[in-house]
Image (cartoon, rainbow, N blue to C red):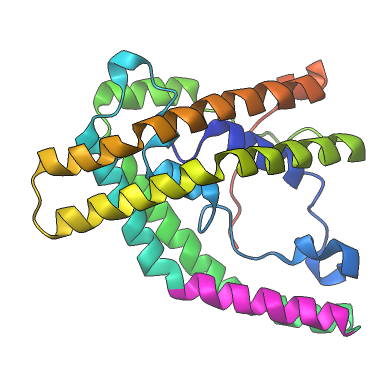
Amino acid sequence: MRRPVVLLVCLTLIGTACGRDPSGATETDQESLALVPDYAESMAASVDGAGIGASGLPTELALTAEQKAAIAALHEAFKAATATDVAELRAIEVEARAAVNAGKTRDEVHAILARGAPILARLGAAFAALQAAIPKIYTPEQRAWIAAHRPKPCGPGGPPRLTDEQIHQIRALQQAFMEAVKDDIALIRRVIEAAHQAAQAGASRERVAEILHQADAAKENVRHAEARLQAAIDAILTPEQRARRCVPVPKRP
């Protein structure tokens, strides 16, 4: 799976109301100036890198320790390869926010943000390669299950529109979720790094698997928290919104 489904749905729903022109952001609307894609550097990416992205798999199709280690290695390689590009996007974000605070015009802010276009293109290509590599680690049975349970892509109408109150409520839920699992995510990151370093040092598969198992309790905590978040979001949405929930088809930068 590319990322935990509940996080994808949450971010997708919020994104439907945040698609304003970033060059016209106000001082209180600077979140619109964010350039770094969620998949490049986020908690969701860290969770997926730990193999939790496929946590919805039934017990008989659960990822093996070797599969988790292989997925973690792919994510670590992606993170290392894109670190410079992510840092450059962060710098552009800072510059754009400073321009907004200084009262620069929309065109001036837009010119700053436009410098991120080729960087986003490189990140998109790198992420596409990561997405192509991960399914090769799954067994045919795992791939079939994931394909059957993948969220449906959005049609021309896009994902459902949310009211301002719904957006506020979902953001509060997401913030509470991130706060609740931050220690578990930090532990998972440390375990992934330890397993990666052990593998690079020539440790056996058994030893790498032993290290990865140290994060089992943390991953279970995240899984349960994720389920609670999904239920809470569903309670906020109307039946029609739940029925229309979908994943937008990525556009070229």
- Say if 44 sits above or below 9 in the image: below
Count the marks: 0
Query: Does residue 99 show up magenta in the picture?
Result: yes
Query: Does residue 13 show up magenta in the picture?
Result: no
Answer yes or no: is residue 213 visible.
Answer: yes
- Say if 155 sits above or below 62 in the image: below
Residue 136: give x, y in percent of width and height: 26, 39
Q: Which quadrant does the N terminus fall into?
A: top left
Residue 128: give x, y in percent of width and height: 42, 53
Residue 21: give x, y in percent of width and height: 82, 63
Q: Which residue: 34% across, 57% down?
A: 76
Residue 252: give x, y in percent of width and height: 58, 58
Q: Is residue 225 left or right of residue 221?
A: right
Q: Is residue 64 left or right of residue 45?
A: left
Q: Which quadrant does the C terminus fall into?
A: bottom right
- Where residue 77 sits, quadrant-wise, is bottom left
Q: Which residue: 75% across, 78% down?
A: 96
Q: Main secondary structure of the magenta part?
A: helix
Q: Nearer the viewer, residue 78 or 245?
A: 78
Answer yes or no: is residue 163 visible.
Answer: no
Q: Nearer the viewer, residue 232 or 36?
A: 232
Q: Is residue 55 left or right of residue 92?
A: left
Query: What span is in magenta?
Result: 84-102
Q: Which residue: 27% across, 32% down?
A: 138
Q: Which residue: 36% across, 38% down?
A: 51
